[in-house]
Image (cartoon, rainbow, N blue to C red):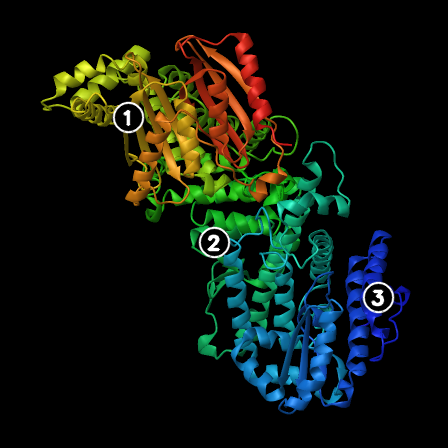
Amino acid sequence: MFTCPPILPYFTPLPALSLQGEANLGIPAWLAAVEADLDKALASGTPIRQVVMGRCCAIDSMMAALFELYELDQTDLTLFATGGYGRGELHPFSDVDLLLLSPNPIDEALNQKISPFVAKLWDIGIDPALVVRSVEECDEACHDDITVATSLLEARILAGNVAQAGLPMQLLNKNWSQTKFYEAKMAEAKERYLKHNSTEYNLEPDLKNAPGGLRDIHTVGWISKRYFRVTNLFGLVQQEFITEKEFDELQEAEDFLWLIRHHLHKIAKRNENRVLFDYQRLIAERIGYCDNSHPNAAVEQFMRDYYRYAMSNSTLSEMLTQHYYETLIEARLPDEQRPVRKVINERFKLVGDRIAVTHTRVFAQHPTAILEMFLLMGQQNIRHIRTRTLRILKIAARGIDEHFRNDPANKAMFMDNIKEQNLLFWRLRVMKRYGVLGSYLPAFGQITGLMQYDLFHRYTVDAHILMLIRMLHRFTDDTYVDTYPLVSGIYRRIDRKEMLVLAAIFHDIAKGRGGDHSELGEQDAIKFCLSHGLSQADAELVGWLVSQHLLMSMTAQKKDISDPEVVAEFADKVGNVTYLNYLYVLTVADMNATNPQLWNSWRATLMRQLYTQTRRILRADIDAPMNRQDMIASNKQSARDLLAGDNGLADIESLWDGLGEEYFLREVPSDIVWHSKAIMAHDEAQKQRTESEQPEPLIILREHRELALDAVQVFIYTHDQSNLFAVTMTVFDQMDLDVLDARVITASRDFALDSYVLLDRHGTLLTDTERQTELVERLKQAFISPTLPEVAQRRMPRQLKHFHVPTKVSFNFNPQSNQHMMILETLDQPALLARVGQVFLAHDIEVHFARITTLGERAEDMFFITDHEDKPLSAERLEKLKQALVETLNIS
């Protein structure tokens, strides 16, 4: 039994229980009173640990009373608390894990005595996870199931046959050796980590099971208790297995997670462990976070603290479980199975596959050895560090101060680490987890755990930076060559890869300070580079990459890169091919490391197109088109080259005369050829129709030329009509198709030439011919229907409900195209483009081009628009359009 906290005497007393009349119906009211008492205690400052244990003690007293009430104390049964309840952890809606253990087989008579007890638990609102077993049955279950074995490790007697108090531990010892138990729990932890992306930094973390959650603390306890026979973690301090500081860190993290779990259960009104967006703001408010500097400040501070505690938890769990293996299991191995020891130098040795210090004073006597160890790991391909060395490292990292940072030897050693590419991500990860990186770069320490409350940034800032460096390494890995063909080739040819690593470290390091993080980061980067011996030119390159790290992605995704002037403006900002190569590599890595789920082949195509066009300009390629007319002429000539030898080329040239210049500006040669052949065949077929037959539009589909199976091109050729864009968007939405790109062009002979690049949310569009046919037929019917198709009614996705993105609409006039570019920023909501299309229809807007960009919960779309006579819109019409979009798309 554990000692109940001081809070317990102030509880509302348990009512007298009786099998007669209504006396025991007061238990639910008593349980509610206990919860009210606990709430008051917590609100008045009682530590969460006392509240959790107080609830456990209250349930203990009730269980013992019910056990006696139903005369189970007159049997040989023993009632044990197991699981979290056995550890003394009960939260408002936690499972109440119980074991009824009998020394003999359980017969019908005993079952008859147990049933009313169990029924009463259900009646009073307890959801018991109750197991009734004989000792023999428990033995068999323990032998086969590590979960059962673990529950026996934590079994705590509540009532009954005290002679059986030690049986659970005896059964565990019989069936699970220390080594077998350790290996099973490590395998269990590995599987658990994989289910949660092996990161502490999930946007909606599971505070029980995710890396850094409560299970990591439990794992330390389970493995240690199995060997040391202690009942709580402090017993490990007394056994000198963990230090008092490590115990304090575990307790502090556990208290914080318990506090979150308490409020999470209260808000969700169930046993909920996922810190969903639905709850994050409320939990932050209840705990006391109240920063109003911006709308998300309080919740971001709360989640930052969560991530920091989670990282501390997972780091300690990893270290202590490995410490258990090295000190207790490894020592028992036969000599031939023990790790081989090899001297590296006078400061370090290799023990098996792990690096270790040669004595405990290494870092104190040779501070530079802190960084030297990580360099040796890269040079000698060493991934892991012995536990004793990690403990010493953690203490030594606290001594990294201004004097250490200004030491030329340490500066040189840090730069040598950056230049050594082998295992760089893993080495920096360990540096971060054990405090070295944050101490050497205080600005990095400030962004550790810093998150942005949105769906776009998948990781905290520190995790994102390290993920970016990991992505850079993948560009040299043959496994990823097919995934990143162009960028891999460019990165491998870059000799000064440390320039990109430094840019990666500093590109987001100034987030959270206020001001433009790119500009502030540029200043930090240049100062760091110059102080670490880099030339002025190198420092300026790194600084430029930091300040411009968003330039290429924003240009590719938010501008019309088929416009030569857009590309020329981008090329002018970049300046030379060297800078372009560095920026392209950094941008692709940054986009993948921000949110891999948002990276797709379409974005890759845009980036590749912008890179290729810019490179031609910067290399002064005499054939590179420099203006709109050059681009049109170039695309036509390239299409002619593809059609060389085609007998119908003369007819196709005649067709081109009626398609208009904008078509040849926007489309690429391979698509021009595809469209032209299809139009010629379609026009020929239409000549065969009778006068009574309705003219049919041409609608063709194919796999995108560069996007493998994840995107499809749809080309529509039909008589122009005012509702064409609205109808098309509505049909696409009805069929769960996401629009990535749209080119809506009207030929000079009043035919629409509309091209779309689509992603199918069901992933079946290219392989399912029935679905392709359905799309074509739906479009055809919608084009001839006198009424607009209804917009599909869908529920707002759960995650999006918790974000407020006010709708913003802005316009810029492009005199070259005589069109307005409309930028729409709004919440990514169901049927967004269909609703936008209906607004355009209502205001007689003609769409000529669209670029659709979704960044997490935020849609940032671009449309080139005119009126139906291809004339610019007046200021009055633009304002009315803006108001209509805001009214339609703003969601309260």
Q: Is 476 on the left-hand or right-hand side of 91? A: left
Kindly report which numbered mark, 3 or 1, lies closer to the viewer in this rendering.
Answer: 1
Mark 3 and mark 2 lie on one chain; the one further toward the N terminus is 3
Q: Earlier in the sequence, mark 2 or mark 1?
A: 2
- Say left or right for 578 vs 630: right
Q: Residue at x 65, y 82 (%)?
A: 168
Task: Tell me the kind of residue under disc 3.
Answer: Trp
Contact? badges 3 and 1 (CB < 8 Å): no
Residue beneath disc 1: 697
Element assignment for label 2: helix
**Mark 1, secondary structure of its residue:** loop
Counting from the top left corner in percent of width and height, residue 279 is at: 67, 47
Residue at numbered disc 2: 377
Across and down, in percent, residue 691 comes to 21, 20
Task: Give above or below for 36 relative to 733.
Answer: below
Q: Give the amino acid at mark 2.
A: Met
Asked whether the beta carbons under mark 3 and mark 2 sit within 8 Å of each other, the answer is no
Q: Which mark is residue 101?
A: none
- The residue that label 3 is drawn on is 30
Q: Nearer the viewer, mark 3 or mark 2?
A: 3
**Among numbered discs 3 and 1, the one appearing first in the sequence:** 3
